[in-house]
Image (tube, rainbow, N blue to C red):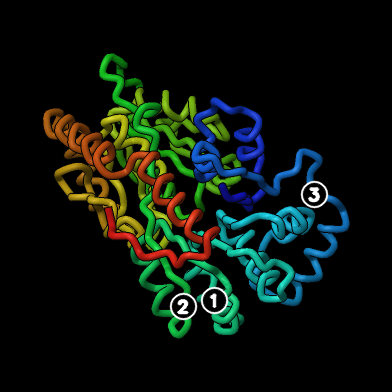
């Protein structure tokens, strides 16, 4: 069986997940456990001792020259172990970009599977984007969690493009399941850590409706940027996923406003809430417009990004229409069980990684 090296972005939550084999946060490891269950030997770059000083200094020099950004400091110390692996899986762009550069310099020769999470936005912001095409061609396979991102990358790379494969993300449908006996303690819940989450829109609605209770769960950094919140909004920061699951169970409605972009549709939180049978209102971003079987009024409510009035109207309809909200939740759960389980995601990923390790080209998968 192959040796699969997982290249992770360094984060306290991910290190905590590595220490806790039964934690719900193991999803942050992008299928490491499931790949190991297939008999593969797995390794990763998050050394318990942290990043050495020499690697941090080298990273400053490389990032100053390249200009595309990246977290090369956390991958340099593991270079030797990556060379002896059969395939390297870069789980996010901040480690994938330096790994592609290392492979182009022939410091890594093993196949590299590159997960793109917002690479189009990064390239469009940077003048160096055009020169990155040949570097991205060093990937054996590019994986995206958004169909529109996959289409953009195929068109942008063009020429000798590696296979760009859309793999819908998944959720543990056993860990996240409906809790019908739980009483609701908050009207509207919003959860998220990514910078595209439009909490400002939600605060606008909270100020308009002081009779409703709102709860926001996010990172401390994200919430600091919000400043003062209305008195009917409670906030929680940096809580474990077990607590997030409890907050889902206590909410009448889950609201996920997101700014327009190609990679983030609050996908992880969306699937978790749907798996728990909750009525979800989410912005119709490009990331979830196709490939996730979302149907407005059937298994969720979809609102155009930035449309505060539209979001308000749908939110009030969902809160006052009890029967319709229950039906939304039931069909949401059915959708996730059928097409977006964690098992389905990790099986698709294993097919790609094992093919790369064997030198076999990956083929684009149909959407769910």
Front disc: 3 or 2 = 2
Which residue in the structure is indicated by mark 1? 137
Asked which secondary structure carries label 1, the reply is loop
Where residue 236 appears, x then y in whole percent? 52, 31
Asked which secondary structure carries label 2, the reply is loop
Mark 3 → mark 2, Cα distance in angstroms: 33 Å
Which residue in the structure is indicated by mark 2? 161
Residue displayed at 42% across by 56% down: 264
Task: Reply above or below: 212 against 158.
Answer: above
Where residue 295 appears, x then y in whole percent? 18, 50
Q: Earlier in the sequence, mark 3 or mark 2?
A: 3
Total labels: the figure holds 3
Q: Is residue 259 left or right of residue 56?
A: left
Q: Nearer the viewer, residue 5 or 203?
A: 5
Q: Earlier in the sequence, mark 3 or mark 1?
A: 3
Q: Nearer the viewer, residue 159 or 179?
A: 159
């Amino acid at each position: 069986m192959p040796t699969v090296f997982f290249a992770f972005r360094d984060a306290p939550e991910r290190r905590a997940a590595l220490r806790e084999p039964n934690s719900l946060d193991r999803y942050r490891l992008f299928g490491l456990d499931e790949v190991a269950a297939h008999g593969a030997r797995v390794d990763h770059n998050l050394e318990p001792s942290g990043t050495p000083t020499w690697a941090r200094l080298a990273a400053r020099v490389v990032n100053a020259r390249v200009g595309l950004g990246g977290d090369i400091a956390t991958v340099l110390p593991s270079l030797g172990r990556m060379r002896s692996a059969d395939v390297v899986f870069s789980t996010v762009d901040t480690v994938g970009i330096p790994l592609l550069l290392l492979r182009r310099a022939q410091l890594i020769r093993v196949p590299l599977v590159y997960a793109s999470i917002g690479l189009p936005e990064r390239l469009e912001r940077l003048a160096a984007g055009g020169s990155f095409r040949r570097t991205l061609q060093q990937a054996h396979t590019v994986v995206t969690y958004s169909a529109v991102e996959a289409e953009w990358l195929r068109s942008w790379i063009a020429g000798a493009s590696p296979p760009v494969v859309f793999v819908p993300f998944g959720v543990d449908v056993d860990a996240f399941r409906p809790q019908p006996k739980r009483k609701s303690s908050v009207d509207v819940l919003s959860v998220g850590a990514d910078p595209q989450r439009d909490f400002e829109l939600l605060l606008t609605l909270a100020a308009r409706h002081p009779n409703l209770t709102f709860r926001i769960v996010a990172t401390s950094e994200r919430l600091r940027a919000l400043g003062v919140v209305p008195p009917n909004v409670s906030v929680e920061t940096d809580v474990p996923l077990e607590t997030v699951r409890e907050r889902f169970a206590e909410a009448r409605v889950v609201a996920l406003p997101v700014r327009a972009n190609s990679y983030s549709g609050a996908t992880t939180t969306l699937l978790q809430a749907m798996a728990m049978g909750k009525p979800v209102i989410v912005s119709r971003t490009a990331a979830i417009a196709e490939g996730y079987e979302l149907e407005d009024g059937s298994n969720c409510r979809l609102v155009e990004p930035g449309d505060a009035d539209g979001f308000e109207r749908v939110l009030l309809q969902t809160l006052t229409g009890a029967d319709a909200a229950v039906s939304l939740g039931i069909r949401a759960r059915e959708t996730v069980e059928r097409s977006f389980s964690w098992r389905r995601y990790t099986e698709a990923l294993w097919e790609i990684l094992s093919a790369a390790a064997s030198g076999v080209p990956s083929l684009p998968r149909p959407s769910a």
